[in-house]
Image (cartoon, helix red, strand yellow):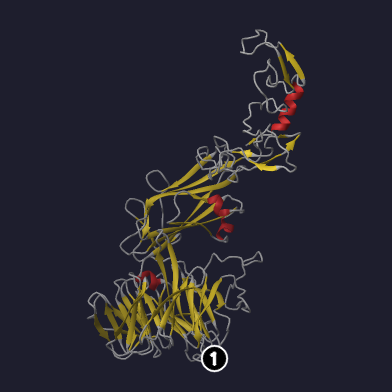
Amino acid sequence: MVMRSASLLGLLFSLAACGGTTHAGDDDDDDTDGVDAGVCSDPDGDRYGEGTGCLGDDCDENNPNVHECDCGEDGRAHVAGCACDALQPEVCYEGTPGTAGVGACTGGLRSCQDGRWTGCEGQVIDQELEDCDYDDNDCDGQVDEGVLGPCGDCSSDCESIDYGPPDGTPFDPDDSNSSGVIETPEGYITLSQTAVSSHLIWIANSVDGTISKFDTRTREELGRFRTGPLGSSGGMWSGNGDNPSRTSVNYFGDAYIANRAFNGQASATKILADLCPDNGDGVVDTSNGGDNVLPWDDEPEDDCIAWNTPAGNVNDLGRSIASQMRQELDGGSHEYAWLGLFEEQKYVEIDGETGELTGEEAVFPTVTPYGAAIDADGNLWSSSLSSRIGRFDTNNPADVEEINVPSGFVYGITVDALGHVWCNGGAIDVYKPEEPDWDSVFGSRYENGGIGVDAEGIVWTHHDSGTIQRVDSNDPALPLTTISSGRGGRGVAVDSDGFIWAINWDRGVSDGDVTIIDPAEPENVDTVCCESINNSYTYSDMTGVQLGIATAPSGTYEMVVEGCEAPDITSWVGFAWEGDLPAETGMRVEVRTAPTLPELAETDWILAGEVPPDESPLDLRAAFGEIESELYLGVRLTLLSYDRDALPVIYSIGLQRSCSNPFG
């Protein structure tokens, strides 16, 4: 950094020189300097002053470095050495115009002393070249450009730990470190066409006004959350409570819940699966099981509850909800949720990040929203508890249509990978928009049933009779298979491993449990879990698998990298990658760090970047902020596709670290 202090520097030079004297004939050659021998009054000794023996006039006799001053016609320009009569100092800056206040550059003060302006003291002006000091020395808005080391920092001891062909450690996606991510023949990683990223299921406890989060593999209840400010209800279809029922789960496992709120205010709530923020007390407060439901007074005390948004009027009934990820004009993506208001016959759009109503609405002539599913083209399909289904384009909500159902009644609704709309109510009906026509009707009357479809195209329904129906959509001519569970319920869901979850909301001896079916052995219905759930009247997408099957795949891949050898200290610097991310695809990068592997497994993930719009390399120092880099680095990639015909492919990854010895 450069600092200029004209008056102090001039004073030092004055003391060192023969200041304050009159020089006569100092020029030994008399005329070699072009100055006739004569007298020069030169207090600061720079040979500029008054007299025929001077090299020229001096406008600042306190500074030997300042003499030829352009003080203007009146001699009073605001530069060092020019005349002044100001009583107060003034702000000054002598660097390149426009650089003051940028990077390290800052202005100084100029004072009027003995009738002359001093230099600009205290200023820091722009340098021509950067120093590698993590500061913007040339004040152009960029830090250390052109002088950083190979790790993108000022350390010369830097290396990139590389993964992927031809020279890096091979990728090794398997069940222990990935979900929905596969290796290509070339050794790259990409999504499987049936990828999902979450091993969670969210089951609403309707009367209690709560929702339970279960691990679909361990069958353990991981948390239970209030879904709104109204609390519990007096009955399944009555009372002033929130009374949650329908859910929608996004690609990251976060849950959106519609609160029906009979005789109360309908609302939607978003609950985060992980990466929950601290809401102010230095600790992430959240439920860790069914016996630990945090209060909701004026605000929810559980930090994983992202927002709650009221919509419509009292008793409008929030009876359907669907979330979606939409591409934005900048190439990035943004999440939205559509809440269906039964009594108003419309859907309202909610910003998935902020929870604010966007003002977008889709209004139907007669369809009363009762269940919802979104297809790959952005169409929302709505059941209605009547003889019609509704459709609207989420990119143009005014594009609305209603379609009659051949069996005369529709209850549950879902969309398969081909964009076909499956309904359960008067029968199992399938609508093919490309024809457009209803292709098949299966069975007779199976009223009040949920419906889901798995990655193999097998359609599953569940209803109060205690039976589960199985239909192979690949061959509609095959007979419908009936499986007896012995437990009544209306919810059916497909988990990330393909198992079928039949939600039993009343089984006679308790308030609910779950029948789990292995689709490879559908006759095996002995697996029962989750007896802690209560009055679980829920039958929409509880896992996010339906969203992934109907719209686009997503998947995760995790890796752990070790830092520098002791006694060196590790600094995790950057995340670089090469790959092909065509339009309608993306990648989310999360990181964490800890001194030991057990601690790493318990550490929260931190978002490092989202592609697009972020580009390679990502700055891990900025991601960690005040968190110290530790020996181990965990990385989690979430690959996304918003178009089933376009998949992201990652060729290679470079994790950059620098090592420094604390003992020098």
Q: Residue furthest front?
A: 74
At 63% from the left and 9% from the top, the residue drawn is: 31
Q: From the viewer's perspective, is residue 557 above or below residue 304?
A: above
At 50% from the left and 38% from the top, the residue drawn is: 146
**Label 1 Cα neighbours within 10 Å, binned few <14 / some 14-19 / many ≥20:** some
Relative side of 124 to 349, left or right: right
Q: Is residue 179 visible?
A: no
Q: Locate residue 416: give its quadrant.
A: bottom left
Percent x, y of residue 456: 31, 72
Relative side of 229 to 540, left or right: right
Percent x, y of residue 4: 66, 34
Q: Locate residue 498: give its quadrant.
A: bottom left
Residue of label 1: 239
Closer to the camera in the image, 571 or 336: 336
Q: From the viewer's perspective, is residue 664 above or below residue 293?
A: above
Residue type at mark 1 is Gly
Q: Quadrant of the N terminus?
A: top right
Q: From the viewer's perspective, is residue 528 above or below residue 12?
A: below
Percent x, y of residue 425: 34, 88
Closer to the camera in the image, 74 or 39: 74
At 37% from the left and 65% from the top, the residue drawn is: 553
Closer to the camera in the image, 659 or 107: 107
Secondary structure beneath dot 1 equals loop
